[in-house]
């Protein structure tokens, strides 16, 4: 179930029907919306990436891992996907892994982020 957040877009609530495997849950959540941000509510880098997308007019789905009882397992799965221990935030666009804050900012600076967002249907202009 998704609900409209005050300033970030849609927030994904923990889904009880999704399988128990953390990687399976990550893949399922990541494929359900044009832009998905896996985040911690108290993480300043997560806040910055959410602000970036909202400032661009994108309405991302934000999955706050600290609001999910199995969020720590999902965070570990995301860390394995990225190949490092600093996993959050993790951004998926069009169901594809973009990466963490560094990859998102690099894509934004070099001009490849907007085309990715348009291709995924998250940005129309």
Image: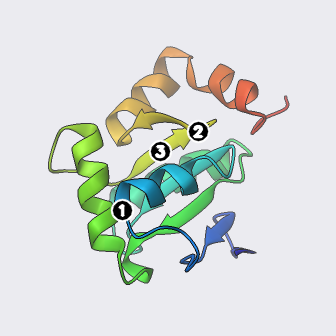
Decide which of 100, 1 is in the foreground and name it.
Answer: 1
| Distance of label 3 from label 2 (alpha carbons) | 9 Å
| Distance of label 2 from label 1 (alpha carbons) | 16 Å
Q: Is residue 40 left or right of residue 73?
A: right
Q: From the image, which quarter does the N terminus lie in?
A: bottom right
Q: Is residue 29 left or right of residue 76?
A: right
* Residue with the mark numbered 2: 95
* Residue with the mark numbered 3: 91
Q: Residues within 10 Å of mark 2 (few under 14, many from 20)?
A: some
Q: Quadrant of residue 57?
A: top right
| Distance of label 3 from label 1 (alpha carbons) | 16 Å
* Residue with the mark numbered 1: 22
User: Is residue 47 in sight in this rendering?
Assistant: no
Q: Which mark is in front, 2 or 1?
A: 1
Outermost residue toward the left?
85
Q: From the image, which quarter does the C terminus lie in?
A: top right
Q: Is residue 4 left or right of residue 90?
A: right
Question: Which comes before the other along the chain, label 2 or label 1?
Answer: 1
Residue at image position (36%, 62%) is 22
Label 3 SS: strand
Q: How far from the left and from the top, in percent, is residue 30?
A: 55, 49
Decide which of 54, 69 is in the foreground and name it.
Answer: 69
């Amino acid at each position: 179930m998704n609900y409209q957040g005050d300033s970030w877009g849609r927030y994904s609530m923990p889904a009880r029907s999704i399988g128990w495997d953390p990687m399976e849950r990550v893949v399922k959540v990541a494929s359900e919306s044009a832009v998905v941000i896996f985040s911690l509510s108290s993480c300043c880098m997560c806040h910055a990436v959410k602000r970036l997308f909202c400032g661009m007019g994108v309405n991302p789905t934000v999955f706050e891992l600290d609001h999910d009882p199995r969020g720590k397992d999902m965070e570990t799965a995301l860390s394995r996907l990225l190949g490092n221990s600093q996993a959050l935030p993790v951004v998926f666009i069009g169901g594809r892994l973009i990466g963490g804050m560094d990859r998102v900012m690099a894509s934004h600076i070099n001009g490849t982020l907007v085309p990715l967002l348009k291709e995924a249907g998250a940005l129309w202009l």
